[in-house]
Amino acid sequence: MCIRESSNKAYSIGIIISGLIAFRLSEKFLAAKWESILFPLVAMAIVTLTILYFPNAQMFLLFSALVGMLSQLKEVPESVFLQETVEENHLVNVYSVLEVISTLAFSVFVVLMSYIT
């Protein structure tokens, strides 16, 4: 099994675990929406930078699972916030723009990383 497949599995396991956590603690997440969005965002940045200091595969898989967990923990209160603040008829446009930005950012970073490595 290659590291890429294992990394995707670790990321997916992280998403599943944090989905269960978000389900169990949803009231607490919703009571502190901004903190529930900001903490995972900052933690993901720290984890992503920390990956650079651990070149072995086991640590990379652990960090992949952590990024999966943190991304889901950020996504849940973020989605609730958008649904509460954006009018229903504009919601599809907001989600479309967010997907376009996400896809463009991913593409730019892939090109950037291909030049670096």
Image: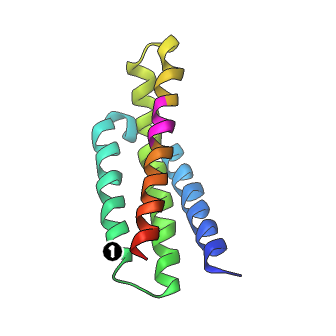
Identify the residue at image location x=43%, y=77%: 117
Q: Name the residue under label 1.
A: 50
Amino acid under disc 1: Thr
Q: Is residue 27 above or below residue 16?
A: above
Using residue 95 as the reference point, say whether residue 33 is left or right of it: left
Pinpoint residue 3: horizontal percent, then vertical percent.
61, 79
Residue that lies at the very extreme toward the bottom in this rendered image: 56
Identify the residue at image location x=42%, y=70%: 115
Using residue 48 as the reference point, say whether residue 11 is left or right of it: right
Residues 17 and 114: in front is 114
Q: Report if residue 38 lies within the magenta region.
A: no
Q: Give the range drawn in magenta.
A: 97-101
What secondary structure is the stretch in magenta mostly built from? helix
Picture quarter containing residue 45?
bottom left
Picture quarter containing residue 37?
top left
Residue at disc 1, secondary structure:
helix
Using residue 110 as the reference point, say whether residue 42 is left or right of it: left
